[in-house]
Image: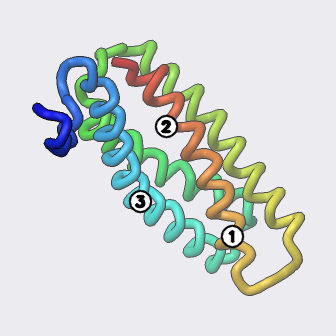
Amino acid sequence: MTATEPTRAQPPATGPADAPRLGLVRQLGRFVAIGVLSAIVDFGVYHLLLGAGLWVPFAKGISFILGTTTAYLRNKRFTFSGANTGGRARFAGFVALYGTTLAVNVAVNSLVLHVLPPMEWDTTLAWVVAQGTATAINFVMLRWVIFKN
């Protein structure tokens, strides 16, 4: 190449060194897609139970458990399917993680409802903040602790 020839940008190399990054991106994409489905389950059940007159923390707890069960089963199969088997230890870790995030989710939901002035969308906003908090905790712990690979 001479000094007058333009340089061409080379496409980024993808090889074994890029596999962890690509694996993380793929997992995150699947996690988000499954999260949307699970969130629909959680959100729908939450509002159905509120409409039925259930106490807010009770409604949030039940909806979280149903959404979480959906997420766990789908993520185990599609997102983290190549992870080690783990057996009882993995299940115990899952129970501990989701027990913790259940408490965080219900507490954050209740706190946001307590802090917000009454408004038309207060339960939805509280649900979004609580769900976002729990989702962040869950992805990190599922990726690097429960389904580590």
Secondary structure state at the residue bearing disc 1: helix
The residue type indicated by label 1 comes to Leu
Which residue corresponds to mark 1?
125
Residue 67: percent from left, percent from top: 47, 53
Disc marking residue 139: 2
Residue at 56% across, 52% down: 64
Secondary structure state at the residue bearing disc 2: helix
User: For the residues marked 3 and 1, what is the alpha-carbon distance in whole angstroms?
Assistant: 16 Å
Residue 27, quarter of picture:
top left
How many labels sit on residues?
3
Which residue corresponds to mark 3?
36
Residue 65: percent from left, percent from top: 53, 48
Residue at 55% across, 74% down: 48
Vertical placement of 48 versus 18: above or below? below
Residue 145: percent from left, percent from top: 48, 20
Residue 21: percent from left, percent from top: 33, 30
Choose between 89 and 15: the one closer to the eye.
15
In the displayed structure image, the side of residue 107 where residue 129 appears, left or right: left
Q: Earlier in the sequence, mark 2 or mark 1?
A: 1
Residue at 29% across, 21% down: 83
Secondary structure state at the residue bearing disc 3: helix
In the displayed structure image, the side of residue 66 where residue 53 appears, left or right: right
Callouts 3 and 1 close, C-beta under 8 Å: no
Q: Label 1 neighbourhood size at 10 Å, few (<14), some (14-19), many (20+)?
A: some
In the displayed structure image, the side of residue 15 where residue 119 appears, left or right: right
User: For the residues marked 2 and 1, what is the alpha-carbon distance in whole angstroms?
Assistant: 21 Å
The residue type indicated by label 2 comes to Phe
